[in-house]
Amino acid sequence: MADQSSKSTVAPRPHRLEYELPVAYRTVSGFVTDWAVNISRGGLFINTQKPLPVGTHVKLIVSLPGTEFPFDMTGRVTRVNETHQAPNQVPGMAIEFVGVDEEKRIRLEEFVERLRKALPPEERG
């Protein structure tokens, strides 16, 4: 009988919703402010001409509409789109949230769910 514990399962990537919001993150030279162009409960994509390398851990400051204050989070770069990688591709980096505490996780999920409900039924995913 095969050992089932050695098989890995890949969780499906959370559905991302197109939505622009300002986000700041730390680089070697300090904090940079850019625009996230989509968001999910598990991460976001930052539109930037100077993406950080895949695997880089970043400190993020995210401002969600409807919240009084921005909150800080930690993320990890999981994918990079270089500036001239493909003609119709937005340059930037995908960030996966890591180590999110319960309060922030709930706030993110509520925000993403509000966005999803505002979409036409065929775009909700």
Image (spheres, grey):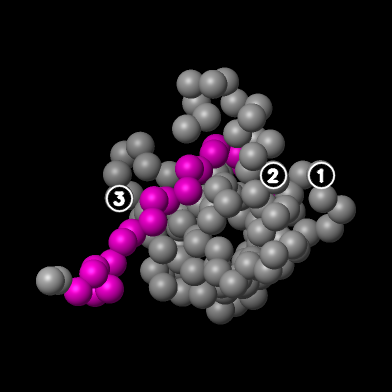
Q: Is 19 in the magenta?
A: yes
Asked whether the beta carbons under mark 2 and mark 1 sit within 8 Å of each other, the answer is yes
Q: Is 79 in front, or is 51?
A: 79
Q: Where is 85 relative to 30, above or below? A: above
Dot 1: few (<14), some (14–19), or many (≥20) neighbours within 10 Å? few
Which amino acid lies under the numbered mark 3 shown in the image of this protein?
Answer: Gln
Give the residue drawn at x 58%, y 51%. 41
Tell me where the magenta segment starts and ends, as one range: 3-22
Distance between the Cα atoms at labels 1 and 3?
35 Å
Judging by the rendered image, the residue that carries numbered circle 1 is: 66
Residue 22: image location, x then y, percent: 68, 51
Report which quarter residue 20 is drawn in. Answer: top right
Asked whether the beta carbons under mark 1 and mark 3 sit within 8 Å of each other, the answer is no
Give the residue drawn at x 73%, y 49%. 64
Which amino acid lies under the numbered mark 2 shown in the image of this protein?
Answer: Phe
Q: Where is 107 relative to 98, above or below? A: above
First of labels 3, 2 by sequence position: 3
Judging by the rendered image, the residue that carries numbered circle 3 is: 85
